[in-house]
Amino acid sequence: MSSPAVIPIPGAKRPEQVDDLVGATGWRLSYSDWRLLEEESRRIEISYSVFYREKKTEIK
C-alpha cells in the first residue's frame, strides 16, 4: 500500500468518468482500516512477466 513504485494515474475518456474520479476524492480511511490494508497487502506476492512479440520480417 505504501510503495513508492505505485502511482495512481487517473484518466477520463468520457465526461461521466470525470464525475467518478472526482467522487473518489475527499474520503479517508480510519487508522485501523489503513493498518489492516497495510498488513494484508504485505502478504501478497506480486510477480510479473514481460511479453515481447517477435517482429517477423519477410525476406524478399
Image: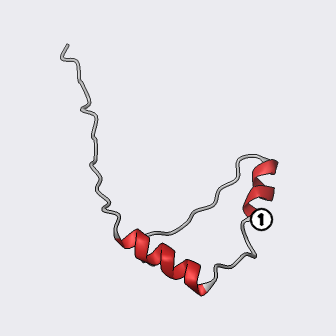
In the image, what residue type sits under mark 1?
Val
Count the marks: how many? Answer: 1
Question: Residue drawn 64% across and 79% down?
Answer: 29
To which residue does mark 1 refer? 22
Residue at the extreme top of the image, as rendered: 60
Q: In the image, residue 44 lies at what x, y percent?
A: 35, 64
Q: Is 29 placed left or right of 47 in the picture?
A: right
Residue at the extreme left of the image, as rendered: 59
Q: Quadrant of the C terminus?
A: top left
Q: In the image, residue 50 lies at what x, y percent?
A: 28, 47
Residue 5 seen from this side? no
Question: Residue drawn 72% across and 66% down?
Answer: 24
Question: Residue drawn 23% across and 23% down?
Answer: 57
Residue 53 seen from this side? yes
Q: In the image, residue 5 lies at what x, y percent?
A: 40, 72
Callout 1: 10 Å neighbours few (<14), some, many (20+)? few
Helix, strand or loop at label 1? It is: helix
Chosen colour scheme: secondary structure
Camera-side residue of 51 and 45: 45
Q: In the image, residue 49 lies at what x, y percent?
A: 27, 49
Question: Residue drawn 81% across and 57% down?
Answer: 19
